[in-house]
Amino acid sequence: MNIKKIIYKTVIAIFTFISAIMLILLESQDIVYADLELAYMIEVNVATNCLYVYTRDLSGNYTSLVKEMACSAYTDNVGGSTRTRILDKREWKQLADGTFQRYAVTLDGEMSIGTVPYTDQSPNSLNGEKYNYIKEGQSSDANIWLTCADAKWLYENCLEGTVVVIYSDWGEITYVDRPEAISLPLDNPNSGWDPTDDTADNPWKECSARIINANSVDVKLGENVNLLEKVKAYDTCGNDITSSIIIMGNYDVNKVGTYNVSYYVADVLGSQVKKDIKVNVTDKKIEKSMSGSKSKDKEKLKPFGQRLKNLIILAVLTYFISRFIRKKIDFD
């Protein structure tokens, strides 16, 4: 009887031990799975209108910066620091005012991160005026707005449950350190489209950065030249980005020769263009003196030629007059 009890207790103990091991293993698998799914953490600084995406470092902390995005954030939604999570994701989300946000990730309290509002669920109905809030770092009317490309990246890569920290810190970065965004010209017929939208029939795909008035120039030896005097550059949307032109190649105005020079510019969408020209440095004084000597020689030769011409005319006239006189004498 005692032996049976011992065997029974031993079996129960072994079974309990195995169950505990299995439970630990299952929990550890759940943790690993969660770590793999929640690969990112999002932070939004509403003061500077910047959004940051972090991934885990070797210690498992979210400190490695993956993405930095310009945004237009709703500052009234934050007092101090707020920690929330992504609860839901929708390709098109209807907002309270009847407009639609594309690639929207919804947070606690119905606040969401996504594109600037569209009038309806079509990619050509974008609110262009509010889109420029992103470029200007201006506070949105509600929610957090991104360009279409950035919103789509969050939508596709940050899963439900991803932690989002929203805070306000003016001292974190200066305005010039903000990620760049393109400005949308409201008088352009394409202003209803987001230039970063990868939709196949997006008309901005037919546009690109361009440089105009980039022509070869002639420079006098020793004289300075401004290679940007008439040159202009424009981004994909037609905004002036002349100040971003980079001049590549070397030239020496103090040495006669022909130099190869290039203008290069790239816009914030990644569109880039290069124009090649030649800078011709010539000694105009030498050429002028040589041409001057030639003209003087011509002036010297001109009287001689004129005299020769006159002599020929005189000789011909003398010949015919003499023949006429001779014939007249013979006739008489």
Image: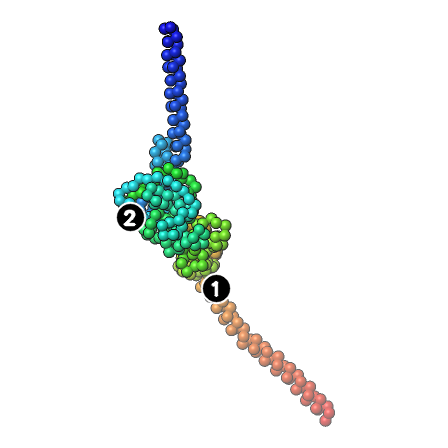
Q: Between tags 2 and 1, which lies in front?
A: 2
Residue 237 in the image, given as x and y percentages of width and height: 43, 55
Please indicate whether residue 311 sits to the left or right of residue 52 in the image: right
For mark 2, does the 10 Å Cα neighbourhood hold few (<14), some (14 to 19), or many (20 or more) residues? few
Mark 2 vs 1, N-terminal side = 2
Q: Quadrant of the C terminus?
A: bottom right
Q: For the point 42% across and 44% down, which residue is it? A: 90
Question: Residue at 54% across / 75% down in the picture?
Answer: 302
Task: Pinpoint residue 137: horizontal percent, then vertical percent.
Answer: 33, 51
Q: Is residue 210 visible?
A: yes
Q: Residue furthest right?
A: 331
Q: Amino acid at mark 2?
A: Asp
To which quarter of the image does residue 192 belong? bottom left
Disc 1: which residue: 287
Residue at 35% x, 36% y: name it.
Answer: 62
Q: Are discs 2 and 1 less than 8 Å apart at CB? A: no
Asked whether residue 150 appears in the rendered view, the answer is no
Q: In the depicted view, which residue is nearer to us: 200 or 267?
A: 200
Q: CA distance from mark 2 to mark 1?
A: 72 Å
